[in-house]
Image: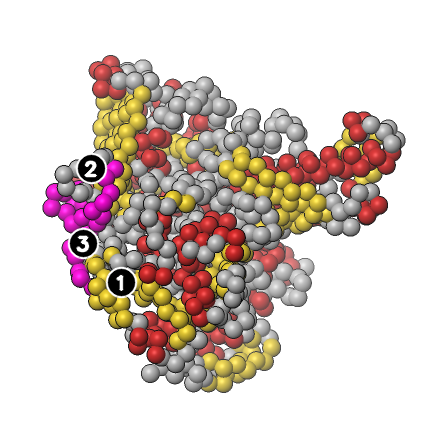
Amino acid sequence: MNTPLNKLPIQAVINGEPKMFLAAPGQILADVLRDELELIGTKIGCNTGDCGACSVLVNDRLVCSCLVLAAEVEGQSVQTIEGIADGAVLHPVQQKLLEHGGLQCGICTPGVVVAAKALLDSNPNPTEEQARYWLAGNLCRCTGYDKIIHAVLDAAKVIREGAAS
Amino acid sequence: MNAKQEFRVIGTRPIRPDGLDKVTGRARYGSDLNMQGQIYGHIVRSPHAHAVIKSIDCSKALAMEGVLAVMTGADLAEPGNTVLGSGEGAIALKDLIPMVMSQGKVLFHAQAIAAVAATTSALAAEAAAAIEVVYEVLPVVTNCRDALADDAPILHGDRFPDGKPKEPTNLAAHITMQVGEPDAAFEKADVIVERTYSVPMCHQGYIEPHACVAQVDAADRVELWCSTQGHFTVRQYTAGVTGIGLGKIRVTPSEIGGGFGGKTTVYLEPIAVLLAKKSGRPVKMVMDRGDVFRATGPAPGAETRVKLGATKDGRLVAADVDCLMDSGAYNGNPAGIPAFMATACYKFSDARSTGRSVYTNKPKIHAYRAPSMPQVTLAFELVMNEMAAELKIDPLEFRLINAVEEGDVNMMGAPYKRIGLRECLEAARSHPHYQSAVAEGTGRGIAAGYWINAGGQSSATLNVSADGHVALLTGSPDIGGSRASMALMAAEVLGIPIETIHPQVVATDAVGYCDVTGGSRTTLATGQAVIQAADELVAELCRRAALDWNVPESDVEWSEGAAHHGEQSLSFEDFASRANGMGGPLTVSSSLNSTSASPGFGVHLCDAEVDKETGRTTITRYTVVQDAGKAIHPAYVEGQMQGGAAQGIGWALNEEYVYNDQGVLENPGFLDYRIPVASDLPFIDTVIVEVPNPLHPVGVKGVGEVPIVPPMPAVAQAVFDSAAIRVMNLPLSPAKVVAAIVEDT
């Protein structure tokens, strides 16, 4: 008999805020973010780590939150799409996606933003090829990726110019 | 307003109104709403692809603590011969209901058999496993050719599209269209090319799985939230499937995470509604990705034979097309498109086209972006290329010689109005891509494509607030940026800043009826309703100004967002702030049934390089040329062109439903059903051709579907030329390409 009410208390830093929540032992991080913490920006497209819609950063490392157990983030820092903008100031990737029209239905967009941020954090000057391979884990069925890649490369430029000034 | 007019904001690229919510994660999709007190539904699915259900025993599941309701197909309406209508054509309840839940017979693997609702999703899954179903298993047929064999298992014993035969068959539909005398006309041809190409069943592959939440109160009033391309259609279908009155159902559309035709029907919604009704609690249901692949309507696989005849000077004299399509387990009506539209790009006085569809033990097919057109176009355009090569005529030139233009008549009998195929072909010919030399080892494919495009019923409401902002309400789910184009069209007519217009897609009871977002109709038809509403609002403001100034209404002019008469003027904001004293609230609703649709045409250029050792294809350059009539928001028109091209590239190279001999889908996930990823594609160049649609107030033609039509033949041709092979069945997977290379050497 499954005992779904048997939950563990987990403490983690979510988008910079210390949080405590309950998670069943087998519960994935994506479900806890969405159902317990109401962070619905993390999307679930496959639950098997194939689509990247649930991308989040755990200790600045890009992961699919459907492949991480909630209990695994005990004591860790988690950054979701809700924590990418600085208050009302969008991250350059968010801003450039808007300017280029790099989203249509938008379901992949949170994952793309999180993944692209992770790329630009580690490499603010990616080639087109590097950007394409880095984002190869984020499925988009609407755009053909053209405007997404343009947006990411443009955002990289903004970040480099910001760092230089 | 007419198509030749200069525009103030139409054709610009403002940031879409819903963009901020989408890049910050605030936008709410199908599974993002939770209702107070909600419980969770789970579906029992058939482990067999063909079976008779002997019994269903839900007693053990119902006895479990926390299980609040169960249902089976017996709880759904009796289909009879009822036919429901929608924007993408009518659907018979007997073809709709079994895609929601079986009512006695199982015709495909993972078909829904029963459902349960429980207080947690884990408990609902556990309870579903406790439902005992006894099946009598029947032989399976998953291939169209096998399904037409004399000894094939018969899926339906009571459907006779060609009149009642002695023995029932699996033929679902058979349609032939003919003009002139094609058999005689082939005699006049100097060159005849005949080929048969096939493509597999594939899936729309939207990233958001189906999801909904439903609540039913004691008076049977239904609140339904779901991800859909048409919430009015969800209302209609849910009423038809559940037997609950249409007027009691209110559907609120969530943001939609892709659909491409696949979300123009219902799967979970009627089940959630009935479980909610039985349990007295809101019921949430989210489909598993595997079940999206296994049990929702994919695009039909098809085998298409095309025979073309042409004279030495490059004139097509006859066509004969025969397309066999896989309908899946129920009638998805795929056969009409090839019959009516296969020859639509070219002038023919003698042509015949046949479409047939066949029942197989697979999910009933459903609309996927220009449904059926890519499959038949694959064969048609590859034969066009082969014919051009035989005639030693440039393939674009060959198409220009034969391209349809205004006044030409296709199989459907109505003359074309002002279409843009010729302009697209000319733009492709002069494009740097076509002018460039083909690189060593690379192949270049070109293909044209047609889609009919729909008009249909749409409504829009404009509510003006006291500060001059406008709420723009429509009932057309925004799947690719249509709220931006609605706002642009309203801003154009009203002459006010786009930032002051707030477009929303609202519930079934908050705006007039709208057909589905499908058929490339939203910007055209809902846009037309928006323009009509804005025109009426301007007329009302001019009336109010005339009254205020005591001048004839006909002397008042509207320009630059203000009413003018001589030196006098009243701005939009003036009217808004003074509405109370000038006749009351400013609100306009407008509805129409648009007959303004115009066919769309596109031409694609593809360069591809095949790695001869591994068979892997790299698309090295890709250009999409398409007539948009008038691009309201060019970035989202380009987005449609690029996205459709990417889907077609995926279908050409990778995408394929793989069934085993038991009728079980072997690749029901994104790992093995491989859609293109960012590293698979180059930048996709776009050329928007604008040949205004004379029937539309701002010249719009539908753009969403055309771009998936040409890619398969364009890519295949490039692969064939690069590897010096010809493969008759797609996808051109590395293994298949390597096998063809080995065979050739």
Residue B159 magenta-drawn?
A: yes
Residue lying farthest to the left in this orientation: B151
For the residues labelled 3 and 1, the Cα–Cα distance comes to 14 Å
The magenta segment: B135-161
Location of mark 3 (residue): B140
Q: Answer with left or right where residue B51 lies relative to residue B708.
A: left
Name the mark nearer the viewer: 2 or 3.
Answer: 2
Residue B255 or A52: which is nearer the viewer? B255
Question: Label 3 is placed on what type of residue?
Answer: Val
Disc 2 is placed on an element classified as: loop
Location of mark 2 (residue): B164
Q: Earlier in the sequence, mark 3 or mark 1?
A: 1
For the residues labelled 2 and 3, the Cα–Cα distance comes to 23 Å
* Residue in the picture at 45% in, 62% down: B273
Q: Which mark is residue B46?
A: 1
Image location (x, y in percent) of residue B311? 28, 16
